[in-house]
Image (cartoon, helix red, strand yellow):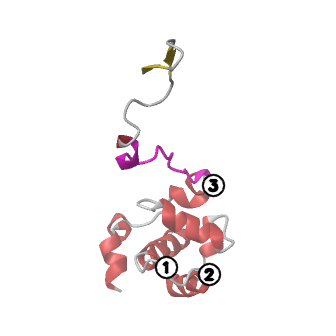
């Protein structure tokens, strides 16, 4: 944008041509990626969400064998102590993770989340 000053010289001003329009544009915010959860052992469980893997990591679990003998309900109760507004959908993922830890190899029919939501 070019403007003429009082001394007669044209000056180039840097900046957006329509600053009022920038107020309506969302900020360029880069989405944070949870690499610790993505690289965790829990992401090897079929149909596991990153949020569920992050929840298990926040409970102090690092490997899927640590889930053997636990129940999905007790894991979810522990997680609700940390995050009171936890998504109830995580319970199905915790049950699935415990099942996969205890059964090698898991039955394909048991890998459906709809099975774990009903119980």
> Can you give x and y, in whole percent of width and height, for residue 102 in the image?
54, 73
- Marks 2/3: CA–CA distance: 19 Å
Residue drawn 36% across and 86% down? 119
* Label 2 secondary element: helix
| Sequence-earlier tag: 1 or 3 | 3
Which residue is under mark 3? 36
Quarter of image, res 92? bottom left
At label 2, counting other C-alpha atoms closer than 10 Å, the crowd grade (few under 14, some 14-19, many 20 or more) is few
Dot 3 lies on which element? helix
Q: Nearer the viewer, residue 44 or 1?
A: 1
Specify the label residue 58 is tagged with. none
Q: Residue at x 50, y 60 (%)?
A: 50
From the viewer's perspective, is 7 left or right of 59?
A: left
Magenta span covers which residues? 22-36
Residue 24 is one of the magenta-drawn residues: yes
Magenta segment includes 108: no
Name the front one of labels 2 and 3. Answer: 2
Q: Main secondary structure of the magenta part?
A: loop
Residue 118 appears left or right of 55: left
Q: Residue at x 59, y 70 (%)?
A: 56
Q: Residue at x 51, y 45 (%)?
A: 30
Q: Are marks 1 and 2 in contact (CB under 8 Å)?
A: yes
Q: Secondary structure at mark 1?
A: loop
Question: In this orientation, which residue lies closer to the viewer: 12 or 86?
Answer: 12
Q: Which mark is residue 82?
A: 2
Which one is closest to the eye, mark 1 or mark 3?
1
Q: Is residue 80 left or right of residue 62?
A: left
């Amino acid at each position: 944008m070019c403007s003429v000053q009082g001394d007669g010289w044209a000056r180039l001003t840097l900046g957006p041509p329509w600053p009022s329009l920038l107020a309506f544009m969302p900020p360029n915010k880069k989405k944070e990626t949870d690499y610790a959860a993505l690289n965790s052992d829990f992401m090897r469980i079929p149909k596991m969400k990153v949020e569920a893997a992050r929840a298990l990591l926040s409970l102090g679990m690092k490997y899927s064998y640590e889930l053997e003998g636990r129940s999905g309900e007790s894991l979810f109760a522990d997680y609700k102590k940390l995050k009171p507004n936890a998504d109830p959908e995580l319970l199905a993922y915790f049950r699935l993770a415990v099942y996969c830890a205890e059964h090698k190899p898991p039955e394909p029919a048991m890998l459906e989340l709809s099975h774990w939501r009903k119980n």
